[in-house]
Amino acid sequence: MTPDTGPRRRRRTVDAAPIPSATERTAPAGNGRTGARGGRAASSSPDVPPEESGDPADPIVLGRRIRYRRKRLRITLEELARTAGMAPSALSLIENGKREPKLSALSAIAAALDMGVEQLLGSKAPSRRMELEIQVERVQRGPMYSALGLPTVRVGPGTSTETLEALAALQQQLGQRLEEQAATPEEARRANTQLRARMQGVNNYFERIETMAAELLAAIRHTGGPLSEHHISRLVEHVGFEIHQVPDLPHSTRSVTDLRNRRFYLPASTAGGSPWSVLLQAVGHHLLGHGRPASYGEFLEQRVETNYFAAALMVPEASAVDLLARAKSQRELSVDDLRDAFAVSHETAAHRMTNLMTHHFEIPTHFEKVHSSGIIHKAWQNDGLQFPTDHSGAVEGQRACRFFSARQAFSGTNRLLSHFQYTDTPHGTFWCSARVEGSEHGEFSISFGVPYEHVKWFRGRATNYRRTSTCPDPACCQQPSPALSELWDGQAWPSARPATHMLAAMPAGAFPGVDETEVYRFLQRHAPAVELDADLA
């Protein structure tokens, strides 16, 4: 049974696909309406400029345009609220950009202001001062400002335009300085952020790859269960390649594909784990038609697709969905069971849960892979859980909240069992299961979870382990407690371990991080029936 202690606060249910905003549900532009005050056509009003380039759904812009129009008509907040049929406090939240109005409320406000809805939704600020107010407010509500822990400046009628100019300029310079500090990994950060947005758009489910994997499994007559070495060999033969394990694979690579001689080269040693998932990723590169990546973003996208391809072969969709459906009917959904049924890593099983749960069962999910140092290496969510981000929106490389299950799992005494936990956050209550796995790069926790309203389907929901996180508030876990600060402030001088991989510029070449000269010499050495030139070996 789910514990009696429900979420500490109400939260809006996160749907599989985002609900259209009020602006997306309005009638097409051009449907004018007659205002309530003067009876003239709304489209004739000169007080608010027509919509230009920008985001008309921005609640800050919308609120400022409503306030600007109201003051031009010399209407008080209370008068407009009464005419529109809403409480003054609700209208104040809308004007301050802290609440997006429903379509009915927006229509009532537009009518009271003698305008059409589509005219009110223009994206251009009505004046230079209004533009500055919007700019300052938008930055103060963004992740960069929140992460700095700075107090917010209340922008009101008493704030001079000169002060707004100075604030806006300071914010712009601060953003530029942060951009300069992060210049070397900036392309990777932006590419990761953009790729995550695309994955969220499809709920991390790639139908084309699922179909391709199912067809391949049918071609090699795989009927279910774990993918054996025999099946993998048949699959490689089916696509017209050979497998070669060699002791001298270039250090910067996990596998090398010889397209001319149709060979997959793998390391002879399996100290780092099974080579089969790496081989399946190499098969994926070939079958998915990947070319030389033109950008780091394309490189990342190819990596995501090949990882997905390998997982879809090792944990076939049809068999996995059947297992998950049975478990859901018994309220026993578990990453552990999926992992054991297909003999894959806990990380692969958790990834497959994110691929399948929303698409097939309408259950939003989140996932984290966190190093023992607390640094996030991978993250995914479509359930509303907020991860820490830098000013560009990137999650990878940030430090996870120490009260999240991904960090708490490291303090457990029994690593053979999964760690279950509820976490109360400003955005709602979430349930997670986490497991610590070792690798050649250290220990990582693999965390999978869902919002509180969906925990009833999962094993581990009866846990009493509960923590509260208020991140990105620095007082949550980033700053020492006042007692510790009083004892040690000015008395400690730690020597930080340099993270050279984060400081170095993006590796040159078509495949980031790969020594192409070493790869080409390797292929020359291993090419069949070739006489080696001393300059090439």
Image (cartoon, grey):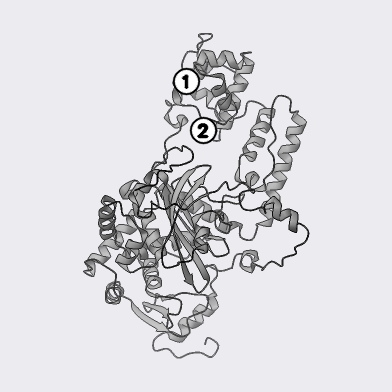
Q: Give the distance between the C-alpha atoms of the residues marked 2 and 1, in whole angstroms.
A: 15 Å
Tell me if 127 is positioned left or right of 25 in this view: right
**What is the quadrant of residue 224 in the picture?**
bottom left
Compare residues 405 and 383 and report the one nearer the observer. Answer: 405
Tell me if 350 is positioned left or right of 536 in this view: left
Residue 229 location (% of width, % of height): 30, 76
The residue lying at 68 percent from left, 37 percent from top is: 152
- Report the amino acid beneath label 1: Ser
The residue lying at 42 percent from left, 36 percent from top is: 19
**Residue at numbered disc 2:** 57
Q: Is residue 177 visible?
A: yes
Assess whether mark 1 and mark 2 are in contact (beta carbons under 8 angstroms): no
Q: Residue furthest top?
A: 38
Compare residues 482 and 471 and report the one nearer the observer. Answer: 482
Residue 177, placed above or below residue 47? below
The residue lying at 27 percent from left, 77 percent from top is: 230
Mark 1 or mark 2, which is nearer the start of the sequence? 2
- Report the amino acid beneath label 2: Ala
Q: Is residue 47 visible?
A: no
Q: Which type of secondary structure does the marked residue at label 2 adopt? A: loop
Residue 91 location (% of width, % of height): 55, 22
**Residue at numbered disc 1:** 107
Q: Which type of secondary structure does the marked residue at label 1 adopt? A: helix
